[in-house]
Amino acid sequence: MKVYLVSIRTFFKENNTDYAMAFDPKDNNDLKLFANYKDAKNEFNNSCKFYRDNFSVIEKNASYNDESTIIFYNKCRSVRYIVSLIEKEVK
């Protein structure tokens, strides 16, 4: 059975150190699991649209293999939002 995970990760730089924000399993926005591709792709597109519409960002496509990934950098490149759609086979 295939499942689809949409994840949003946040990274930031401060004092020349790169930090990753922790995933919050209680927050419904960090990780979302879907049983079908259509719903997952819709969530992925909506999440990308949110960053495009609400933040001044530079966008880079970092997709590979079965993973769709878009990196959104803020203008000074100190904050990165990474939105991914990952397909996994589970048994």
Image: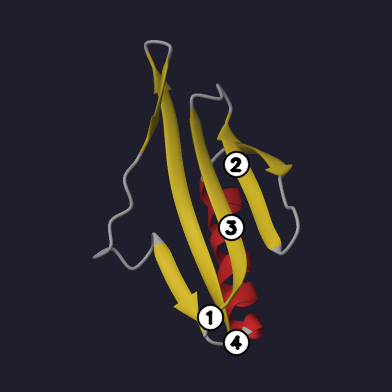
> What label sits on residue 77 in the rendered view?
none
In this rendering, is residue 45 above or below 22? below
Relative placement, left or right, of 28 versus 53 is left
CA separation in Å, label 2 and label 4? 25 Å
Q: Residue at the location (53% across, 87% down)?
A: 35
Residue at image mark 3: 84
Q: Relative to 17, is 83 above or below? A: below
Q: Disc 2 marks which amino acid? A: Phe
Cα gap from disc 2 to disc 1, whole angstroms = 30 Å
Choose mark 2 or mark 4, whichever is in front: 4
Going from the N terminus, do you reach mark 3 or mark 4 first? 4
**Mark 4 belongs to which amino acid?**
Asn
Relative image position of residue 23 (x, y in whole percent): 33, 52
Q: Residue at x 60, y 65 (%)?
A: 86
**CA gap, disc 3 and disc 2:** 11 Å
Label 4 and label 1: CA atoms lie apart by: 13 Å
- Tags 1 and 3 in contact by the CB under 8 Å rule? no
- The mark lying in front, picked from 2 and 1, is 1
CA distance separating discs 1 and 3: 18 Å
Q: Are the residues at dot 2 and dot 4 in contact (C-beta closer than 8 Å)?
A: no
Q: Residue furthest front?
A: 91
The residue that mark 2 highlights is 72
Instruction: Check disc 1 and report its element: helix, strand or loop.
Output: loop
In the picture, measured across the screen, residue 12 lies left or right of residue 71, that is left
CA neighbours of label 4 inside 10 A, class few (<14), some (14 to 19), many (20+): some
Amino acid bearing label 3: Ser
Numbered mark located on residue 90 in the image: 1
Q: Residues within 10 Å of mark 2 (few under 14, many from 20)?
A: many
What distance separates the C-alpha of mark 3 from that of mark 4?
15 Å
State the residue at coordinates (71%, 41%): 60
